[in-house]
Image (cartoon, coloured by chain):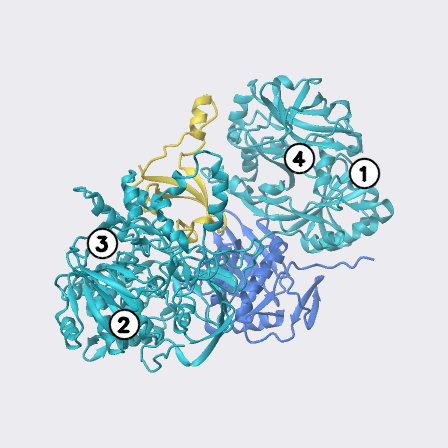
Amino acid sequence: MVDIKRVSPVSFGKSPKRTEVRDNWTIAMEYDSEGQGLSIVDLSHVTRLDVQTGDLSGVTPFGVAIPEVPGQSVLKDGILINRMNGIQASVFQLPGNGADLPTDVFVTETTENTLCVAIMGKDVFSFMEKVSNLDFMDPKMTAPFLFQGPCCHVPCQIITLSKDGDKAGLILTCSRGYGKDMIHSLLDAGVEFNMKPAGEEKFSAWVASL
Amino acid sequence: MALTITCPICGKRNGYEFRYGGEDKGPRPEEAGLTPEAWCDYVHMNKCVAGVQKEWWFHKDGCGSWFTIHRDTTTNLEVKGPEADK
Amino acid sequence: MMTRFNQLPTLKIDPTKKVIFNYKGKTYSGVEGDTIASALYANGVRIYARSLKYHRPRGLYSLDGECSNTMMEVDGIPNVRTENTLLKQGMTVKEQNVKGSAEKDMLGFLDKLDWAMPAGFYYKMMHKPARIWPIAMKQIRKTAGLGEISPDFEMPGKFDEIFPRTDVVVIGGGPAGMTAALAAAEKGLRVIIMESRPWLGGFFDYRTAEYKDGVALYQRGQDLAQQVEANENIRVLKHTAMVGAYSNCLVTGFQTGTDKDAFNERYVEIRANSVIVATGCIERPLIFDNNERPGVMQVGCALRMARNYGILPGENGIFSVGHDLGLEAAIDLFDMGMKIGCVADVREDGQDPELVLALAKRNILLLKGWVATEAHGKKQVNKVSMSSIDGMITRDFDCDVLVASAGLTPVTGPLTMAQIKLRHDDFTGFFVADEMPENTFSAGRILGINNALSIECSGTLAGIKAAKACGACDAAEVEAAEAAMKALPGPVRGSKLVTAPVKGRKSFICFDEDTTIKSVKQTIDSGFDVPELVKRYSSAGLGPGQSGIPGHNLPLYVAKYQALAGVPVKPTTVRAPIVPTFIATYAGTNHTMHKRTPIHNLQVADKGILRKIGVWERVRYFSEDYSCKKEIENVRNNVGMLDGSTLGKFRLHGPDALKALQRIYVSDMSKLKPGRVKYSAMCNDDGCVIDDGVVVMLGENDYYITTSTGRAGQTVEWFRYHTRYDGWDFSMVNITDSMGVINLSGPNARKVFEKITDEDVSNEAFPYSGFKEMLFKDVIPAKVMRLGFVGELSYEFHVASSYMTSLWQLLKEAGAEFGIQNFGVEAQNVLRMEKCHIILGQESEQRTNLLDVGLGFLWDRKKADAKTVGAVALRQAENDPSRFKLVGFKMENNGRAPRDGALVVDSKVRGYIATARDSFSLNEAVGMALVESELAKVGTRLEIYEDECGDERIYGKVVPMPFYDPDGTRMKS
């Protein structure tokens, strides 16, 4: 008998201390010794949507208005919306928000399309400097904001949720197929910042603190 | 890469995030009455100016937009538009 | 071991902390802060290596690694620049380029054979008669080259990279660089300052001369360094050599790690909004006979050895200099205990009177207008001949160190790399930039100034100009800083002497390549008349130090020797990496970035053999039998499953979606019906076929399309490019990675399918070319297509990637009783070839159009309004008899299959083999070939030429396609 389950593209090579099964995903809630350095959290199970139509004005996924300027993001009640360009936005339904998905024809669910991790900690931008040439510390950029550009030479969406000292952190997505190599590269670059896998709880607590 | 391209959505980025889309030649011609020569010219003939040209770029590693910039082909530097657009 | 000064305020070492290392098998000790070179010197080592060509003894010369004199093998790594590499506990250091030892090198005799090795002797000698060359080449190769490395050597250590962004990057951490950084940081800008030495301070750092108000220069340097390091806006990258500078303010370098760092060396690529070049000066070598004999060293080297490393470089010094810094160094070294027999200054006048007075007070003989002409001593200098610069009078002096320097030369590498034309300035003797790249400014001694206050002020001015370029201050502030600069002393006159009055047979202009003045003369006499050509023919400046030693002297000497009127002195070009850099540093972490399918691990566990195919890693075979016999036969007889997850997949929706489809695909997409799969192709504007795949209508203005694996990354780009002028409202989502794909094929496919679903999947309910969306086990969403690429009954399951593991297990379990087995990409390749289903890129190349490969039936000619990409060209090509045709063939006399890519020939090339295999299904060798249309008729004999087959040919015959199941009953029933 086959056990029906969903498999994340992300593996940290370490078993979580506590997991939770949700919608057939086995979600790591907490790891042993998550540490004080950088944290990396697998969020590949987080529902993600592509909203794309010629006229985005008045489109409000989960009741949240899409930011007007590409590159801007908004985080409200567990919904994160990032304006990608003139006609497109990416939407994240973060853990805890259980609202039904919009059924509009211009919405495509893309949860499965990418891997998704959050990286949090005060050294997060020193870390990102090793894997990307994007200018996260540009004083003109105020969090939350979206970068669409390369990380580890792979096109990514990177949403900086906070640039603020210990609270600094971001969410990164890229094509799911890169899971193994991307996580390997991130963990390798993270060694000097004591990067450790952490569970969804740490992520949720961080989001709540923002 | 030293080359930078300014994407109208994402701003100034490293050149390797983009793919070149050729000189700007205007929309596709109507097919009715189109001679083979005229078509071939539209597809293959370029001005190849030594100087400023208007050209297409695609932000493949970024927002996925096609857009035009002006670039001085003698210095390989982006220059301000459209007064230079001749 | 020599006694070392341990109390100097300028020391960079901690004499109380010993560092033990191994040199030539013996244990030596240095101290913390030592470079390998300084530790060796402290231990009495004077000869560090032998030179490239003549095996001359070489020693410490510049202390900044400007030549290969002190390159050694350290911990197995050849060509380590020991002047720039800090000593570490337990290091193993060896000499290189010696046969025996550096002290007693058995190839030392080569120095006497210089007459046999003139400039360009590689080109001139040993090729007549021709049979000599192979023998000579072997000998030359044995002796040529610096350092040795074994082919299986693996670089130890950790190498990575950073890509910092900043407003201003300052190249050079001397006084000008530091004041520039402070000025820019004060305007609130982000600043990065990079300095090649392990500390800030530049040429203030080791000088005790007065800066101002009783403060010594080194104190001022330390004070500035503290301010810089304490400034929050400034990021200091020490021990970071710049190796490249490019347009758009891109600066690269590498940082050497300390014990505390996570890396040994780190590649640094900085993108800034403004660049400040404050690289300062190095010394211009003085050219005389044996000017590179160990014991001969530059002013900065001698003084820094004492001031920074606490080592008096010799007991008896002689100076032959061309600049006030030389006089200052003589005074300081005298005060530290060096006996100084004489200071010769090439300048007849113009010396700082205070320095002249200070020399006189110490009874040091100052000879104005004099210069060293020859260093004596077989392996180490013990005597020097001096002469007046006209060569009239000569005197000899005993010494154990000869401090020699012709003058200063600005470090213009970053400017030449940024393609700035440099002009020779007759007053300073410097190469100067009249025009700078956009947002790039220079500061400090590179401008020819030498006064400490001027240098700092020039830094401040550059910092403010950079701030203005970044929009952080206004023009008035720049004007004020310019006015301040004008009030201070400007550039100083530089010494112009190029060479002492010598013939030059043993006077070296380039140490790395053993180029003498005589070689340069021979080169010019051979007709190479500009410095760039002289450089290449004489190889001066082609060594690891590039322009460090010869960069300034070579063009000056060429100009002087040619004595042509009105020809400007032109410098040669330097190229990245300006400073020798480990390849490991450039490689960095060098992770491979490949995609894997959702069932990658399961297939590998089933003995899948991987190949990198484009961005993907895919399973090509499931056994070591690369003919894939078992995999193929199992699909033909039972059922197989293939991981097709790499297929490109897209959702296309929006009001103008159909218009976009009509533009891109050759078929008429208005005829699509829900529940049916439409196969079609895309062409480029030349009508050449670039991709094929299927289109499914999901709903109104809502489509699902697939593309080939290789085109997946460009499909959105392609659609948008060809509609970029139209302003159509359509949306495209690349969902390639959203869904994995399993292709279930074989006569038992339906039986397996039935076991995992309750839906009716009979041939009537789910016919060939059908499409259904369904849920497996109530939760797994799937799009299922009835296709037949491999020529059997076949279903393609497109399933959410996260559920792919479960689906794969379900199919495996359900198929166990029907003999289900995996098959890989190669088996699929053979299966579809037997059926003559093409793969674009295999049965086509760049010039192959839709009609050539027999897909003309897909093209709808009646939709001219759609301006379908490729349609105009196809119309033109339709009646063109010169085009290739795709044909099927089988081999004569049961022969083997030719290799893919073999040529079809007669008296000339007539085509080529696209794919051919020994077919197990048909028991004969078959394949497809693209041939000229006159060879396309069934029955035509094809003469096939394979790579390296000589006169042998193999023969095939054109046969009808497809070879396998021609009426398609197997895939359609």
Q: Decide which of tag 2 and tag 3 comes sooner along the chain.
A: 2
Q: Separation of disc 1 and disc 3 at Cα? A: 81 Å
Q: Which label belongs to residue C916?
A: none
Query: Looking at numbered disc 1 in the image, what kind of residue is underneath it?
Result: Glu
Residue denoted by label 4: C678
Chain that is coloured yellow in the picture: B
Residue denoted by label 3: C498
Q: Separation of disc 2 and disc 4 at Cα? A: 92 Å
Horizontal side of C637 relative to A65 (left or right) equals: right
Q: Decide which of tag 1 and tag 2 comes sooner along the chain.
A: 2
Q: Decide which of tag 1 and tag 3 comes sooner along the chain.
A: 3
Residue denoted by label 1: C633
Q: Residue at 31% of width from left, 39% of height from top?
A: B51
Residue C856 visible in rendering: no
Please state which of the two labelled residues, at mark 1 or mark 2, is closer to the viewer.
Answer: 2
Decide which of B86, C31 is in the foreground and name it. Answer: C31
Query: Looking at numbered disc 3 in the image, what kind of residue is underneath it?
Result: Val
Q: Decide which of tag 4 and tag 1 comes sooner along the chain.
A: 1
